[in-house]
Image: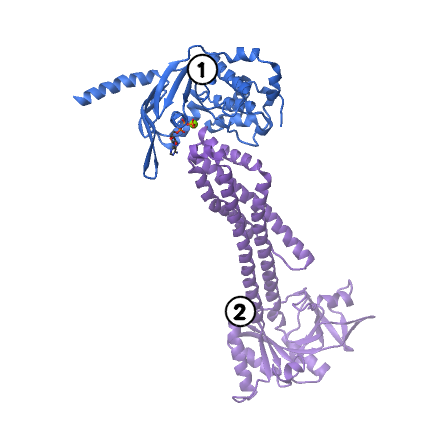
Chain colours: A blue, B purple
Amino acid sequence: METQVTAQIHQATDALHTTSLISLVHIHKTYMMGDVEIHALRGISLNIQRGEFVAIMGTSGSGKSTTMNILGCLDKPTRGHYYLDGEDVSKLSRDELADIRNRKIGFVFQGFNLLSRTTALENVELPMLYLGLKPAERLKRATEALEIVGLSDRMHNMPNQLSGGQQQRVAIARSLVNHPAIILADEPTGNLDSRTSIEVMDVFQRLNEERGITIALVTHEHDIAQYTRRMVVFKDGKIRKDEPVGETRSAREELKNMPLIADEDDEEDDE
Amino acid sequence: MNLWGTFRIALRALSRNKLRSSLTMLGIIIGVGAVIAMVGIGQGASASIQAQISNLGNNMLIVFAGSSNTGGTRGGFGSGTTLLPEDITAIEQECSAVKAASPVVRANGQLVFGNQNWVASSGIQGTNEKFPEIRAWPMAAGEFFSEADVRNATRVCVIGKTVADNLFAGSDPVGQTLRVRNLPFRVLGVLSVKGQNQFGQDQDDTVLVPYTTAQKKMLNITHVQAAMVSAISAAATFTAEKQITDLLRQRHKLSGNQENDFTVRNLTDVAEAADQSSKIMTNLLASIAGVSLLVGGIGIMNIMLVSVTERTREIGIRMAIGARSGVIRRQFLIESITLSVVGGIFGVLVGVGASIIISKTLNWPTLISPVSIIASVVFSVLVGVGFGYYPARKAAALDPIEALRYE
Ligand SMILES: Nc1ncnc2c1ncn2[C@@H]1O[C@H](COP(=O)(O)OP(=O)(O)OP(=O)(O)O)[C@@H](O)[C@H]1O
Ligand SMILES: [Mg+2]
């Protein structure tokens, strides 16, 4: 009797999983610190559809990064299921997860995480190297991606010859090249000043609107969340609030109205 | 991800830090270079000793007249008078380990041909017809004197190349008459070139005559100064030494505690001892150099470990964007193999160069064998794999989240 019910529930949820791009079902994550259990996530369920632009917010320690790590297949949930593109990835092996990350996930980090002493172009080519693409195809896609983020003229610069905002745009280009199902960004504007943050949000907004790329980003700043279209708020390892952003701000419009003086920070290569 | 792709990634990673890469290679370069140079020196020494052994003759022993620790040797080469031609004949006939024996009677004196004169530095040597066989010294022209020449004490001679060049410049000496100590000798033949002996003496600067002729017509003696003896094999030289000693003691009627009035010297034995010690030296040098290669290998491991730690974040990034841990492991392994192989190749060049410089400046013979080159390169690959494996495994085992968080 009970098994029948659970089977029905499974069928129902499975149907749901196959339609959503991302589906977290009762995810728990428990860390062991010696004898102490730390419940980082306590039963998270979250669906993200194709083309969504989601901001994940919450106080420090509420489980945002833990969730992002699971979404990014860098970590496995202690309990629960994670369906990515209809496939249950919560029980895959290390190598299978590496392949999923390569093909389906694009990462953007707070600290940019570009390879040092490696040109912007080579950094962007890296994911395609692991995918095994031919050099000509790699060059073509990397050049395109750098064009999209507006860095065609900085392709041969090393990361230390780029400003923070430019480095983050290289990282976004890198996250794009393998045509991932979703781009995950953990505090992508955390190290940037406010104008540069808006520029990065402009890149995200254009990717989302013009190319329909699904994006989930973690931010502490309410202002930044306003550029997305849905806001998920975490508290103590649970989702406390999940609501659409009332009036999405347009980064492009705001940049147009900003005084040009601020440009110097970004466009010139200050040491 | 194929191996070639991983190889390119590894090469790029290495070229990103050229100074560190070349310093790491330096350890291997010095190690391999040292092994090749040291083995080259050792083998060169060994080869030149081997050449001297074969130069000496066939498993040769020398019997000197006179005791080794009394007047005999002090009085010079074969100063005793108790060694007789009959003793030599007996040695050849009665000692089973002896193949051939030939008396040696030495004289000095001027050689004259036409208006040319010459004093041979290796002297005038009286010997018998066995000489070419015992010394493994063939003729270049003409022939050696015969047993009949020895029996009849005829005035015939065979000359070395140096004498031929100096007295007969250009013309054929065979059949000419040479004056030795003012007596006319017919030249029967010219010996082939033998070169210097281990004391730097020109062995080709000599004249050979029947020992009987030297005894009767030059020195007026009946004894001989020494004998050259050829044993049946290298191993038999020891038995021959014993048999000769016993035979001569018996023939010279020496009782139990009387000292030998002759000295038997086993030249093969001496040469082989020298060869042995040069082989030991080769091994010693090679092991010292091997230690430096090992140190170079540990250097690679050290740098690779530092590099894994230093590049933890890089590893995290690579893993996050989809590098499997096997790919990371291979990348680091290829990095260390590349360092050690490139280092090994440079090391071979350095080693060969050093050997050439050593043999040119110090005049030491060196011998670069392909075996030592191949062995060094193979060994440096093994060093790369062996000492690179642990750091590579460490890199591959990193957790991507931790690695990304690493400062
Ligand atoms: N590797 C770990 N081992 C033990 N506890 C951990 C580990 N990673 C995270 N935690 C704990 O899990 C909880 C959630 O951490 P998480 O990093 O997800 O928070 P966050 O919402 O990203 O915070 P912040 O805004 O400060 O980045 C925290 O209490 C944290 O201490
Ligand atoms: Mg966090």
Instruction: Report the quarter where the N terminus of chain A lies.
Output: top left
Image quadrant where one finds the C terminus of chain A: top right
SS at mark 2 in the image: loop
Foreground residue among B233 and B354: B354
Amino acid bearing label 1: Thr
Determine which quarter of the picture holds residue A185. top left
Q: Identify which residue is drawn at 65% across, 53% down.
A: B356
Q: Secondary structure at mark 1?
A: loop
Q: Is residue B33 above or below residue B105?
A: above
The mark found on residue A164 in the picture is none
Q: What is the tally of numbered marks visible in this picture?
A: 2
Amino acid of disc 2 = Ala
Q: Is mark 2 within 8 Å of ligand 1?
A: no
**Circle 1 chain:** A
Q: On what subunit does the disc labeled 2 rest?
A: B
Residue placed under numbered mark 1 in the picture: A228
Rate crowding at label 1 as few (under 14), some (14 to 19) or many (20 or more) other CA atoms within 10 Å.
many
Q: Which residue is mark 2?
A: B234
Residue at 41% over, 21% down: A57
